[in-house]
Amino acid sequence: MLFVGAREGHWPPIFSMIHIRRHTPLPAVLLLVPLVIAVTFTVVCFFIVGLSLYSDPWNTGISCALTLTGVPVYYLTIYRYRLPHSWRRFFDYLSKQLQILLEVAQQEVRTY
C-alpha cells in the first residue's frame, strides 16, 4: 500500500521506486508488516479511542484536536511542489542521495 500510495502522490516519491537488481519496491518493503498485525492494531486503537470517548469526552476531544495538528505535515509531504524553491531543492537532493544509497530508480514502464 505504501508503494501504491507513493505512486499516486500520497507519500514521498522515494517509496515508489524499484530496486535496480531485485525489481522490488525496496524502500516500501522496509516498512512491511503482516496484515493480521495491522488489522489487530487498528481494531485495538479504535477500541481504546471509543472507551476514552465514553469515559472522558472532553480530554479525548482535546487529544483529537492535538492529533489534527499533524495536518501541516501532510501538506508539507503531499504538496511539496508548493514549497519554496530552497525546500524543493533540499527534498530533491535528499531523494537523490536515498536513490544512490538504496540503489533504486523510478519505474521505466508505467504499469498502472
Image (spheres, helix red, strand yellow):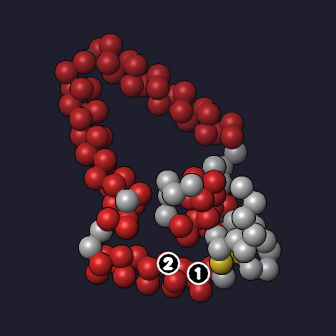
Q: Amino acid at mark 2?
A: Ser
- Whether residue 32 is visible here, answered yes or no, is yes
Residue 53's image quarter? top left
Instruction: Please give the label number shown on residue 95.
Output: 2
Instruction: Locate residue 13, reporting x and y percent.
Output: 53, 67
Q: Identify the residue shown where x is 25% and y is 45%.
A: 69
Q: Amino acid at mark 1?
A: Gln
Local packing at callout 2 (Cα closer than 10 Å; few below 14, some 14-19, many 20+) is some
Instruction: Please give the label number shown on residue 99.
Output: 1
Residue 60's image quarter? top left
Which residue is at the front of the view, 22 or 63?
A: 22
Whole-number angstrom distance, CA of label 1 to CA of label 2: 6 Å
Local packing at callout 1 (Cα closer than 10 Å; few below 14, some 14-19, many 20+) is some
Q: Identify the residue shown where x is 25% and y is 18%.
A: 56
Q: Identify the residue shown where x is 36% and y is 80%.
A: 90
Instruction: Locate residue 38, reporting x and y percent.
Output: 61, 39
